Amino acid sequence: MTVPTGRRERKKAATRQKIADAALRLFMERGYDAVGIRDVAAEADVAVTTVFAHFAGKEALVFDQDENFEQRLVQAVRDRAPHEPLMPALRREIHALVRHCTSEDAAPLWRMIDEVPALRAYEESMRLRHARALATALTAHFGLPPETTACRAIARFAIDAFSLARESIDPEATVDEVFEMIAAAWETAAPALERPEAGAEDHAGSAPS
């Protein structure tokens, strides 16, 4: 998780976490549909406006790590170590996200998500948004047009690896299996993804990294 550095940022993060924890307690105790935003505000001892200052709506309270997950995926592309290949960096990050979401503590939360149509719809829209953010990071990093199909497809496959792994009896193996296919697709697409300004000897015979 990204750690806030300034005092103001730490205070905001602590308030946000307090609200998310309060919401989760109520959802687990009473059921998602039986809890309203006012209930969450009262449980967290904050104003309703404070809840909305941190979360766009009730569904967002369930996915409180949404923005952090998206940032981590983007950083796996943008901030990885020099000369570290792209696929291992992405695979490592997806593994970390899967471990977070498949822990024993997370099981009741995901059962609730699977049972509530509004939460399933929100999760789907969240996955699409993460795929778009990851595709944007890929095209920006490699100096490619935003509509580059290969980057959009690779991004979607990476997000799907997370979704498939969460539902698998062996999440870690599922991530590895899907990423073997993703890596093969990336290698195949490599010749069309060379940056025009890059030297030929830097890229010959290899995928962008």
Image (spheres, grey):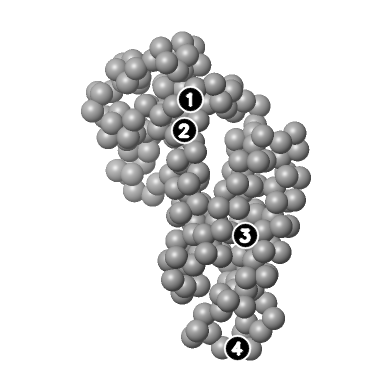
Q: Point out residue 95 in the picture as x, y percentages from the top left corner.
A: 65, 47
Mark 1 or mark 4: whose residue is earlier in sequence: 1
Q: What separation in Å lies between label 4 and label 2 (alpha carbons)? A: 45 Å
According to the image, label 3 marks what residue?
Answer: 89
Q: Crowdedness of circle 4 by 10 Å Cα count: few (<14), some, many (20+)? A: few
Residue drawn at (71%, 40%), measured in percent from left and top? 171
The amino acid on which the numbered mark 2 sits, given as a three-letter code, is Ala
Q: Point out residue 34 in the picture as x, y percentages from the top left corner.
A: 41, 12
Q: Crowdedness of circle 3 by 10 Å Cα count: few (<14), some, many (20+)? A: some
Closer to us: 10 or 54: 54
Q: Crowdedness of circle 2 by 10 Å Cα count: few (<14), some, many (20+)? A: some
According to the image, label 1 marks what residue?
Answer: 117
* SS of the residue under disc 2: helix
According to the image, label 2 marks what residue?
Answer: 121
Residue drawn at (50%, 44%), measured in percent from left and top? 127
Residue drawn at (67%, 64%), measured in percent from left and top? 185
- Asked if the residues shown at circle 4 and circle 2 are in contact, with their CB atoms under 8 angstroms apart, the answer is no
- Asked if the residues shown at circle 2 and circle 1 are in contact, with their CB atoms under 8 angstroms apart, the answer is yes
According to the image, label 4 marks what residue?
Answer: 200
